[in-house]
Amino acid sequence: MKNELDNKQILAVYERIQKRGEATNEGKHYQGITAYSDIDGYTIYLQGSGVILRFGFHNAYHLDYEHDKHKDDFLKKIVNIANEE
């Protein structure tokens, strides 16, 4: 799957998870993704399927993962959440 996430999509997914997600010790969890931020709220994180997406300074993001399959699964979940009504 081609990585086609944009900044607005990442922020929209984060907000949707914050609104619809279930509170856990790690953050809000929704549709297989956990969303949380650092203490000052400057950096947000989306985590699931063995992937951590870090989004912050200068609207840049970085994906940490070991296997492409994990990244593909994670990106599908992000797109699904983004496309919900």
Image: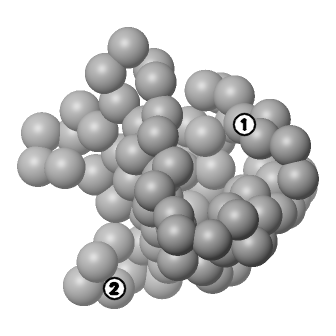
**35 to 69, vertically: above or below:** above
Please tell me which of labels 2 and 1 falls first in the chain: 1
Q: In the image, is 73 to the left or to the right of 46?
A: right
The answer to whether the residue labelled 2 contacts the one labelled 1, judged by CB atoms less than 8 Å apart, is no
Nearer-the-camera pick, 14 or 53: 53
68 relative position to 1: left or right: left
Q: Residues within 10 Å of mark 1 (few under 14, many from 20)?
A: few
Q: Position of residue 8 (x, y in %)?
A: 65, 27
**Residue occupying image coordinates x 72% and y 36%:** 5
Tag 2 residue: 24
Question: Which amino acid does the dot numbered 1 rest on?
Answer: Leu
Residue 19, position in %: x, y?
Answer: 54, 61
Residue positioned most to the front = 67
Residue 13 drawn above or below residue 11: below
Secondary structure under the numbered disc 1 in the rendered image: loop
Between residues 50 and 5, which one lies in front from this camera angle?
50
Give me the disc on residue 44: none
Name the residue rendered at 60%, 78% in the picture.
49
Q: Nearer the viewer, mark 2 or mark 1?
A: 1
Asked if residue 21 shows in the view, the reply is no
Q: Quadrant of the C terminus?
A: bottom right
- For residue 24, side relative to residue 74 (left or right): left
Is residue 46 visible in the rendered image? The answer is yes
Q: Amino acid at mark 2?
A: Thr
Give residue 39's position: percent from left, percent from top: 11, 49
Residue 5 - label: 1
Q: Residues within 10 Å of mark 2 (few under 14, many from 20)?
A: few
> Could you tell me which residue is drawn at 62 percent across and 71 percent down?
67
Query: In the drawing, does residue 25 fall left or right of residue 35?
Result: left
Q: Secondary structure at mark 2?
A: loop
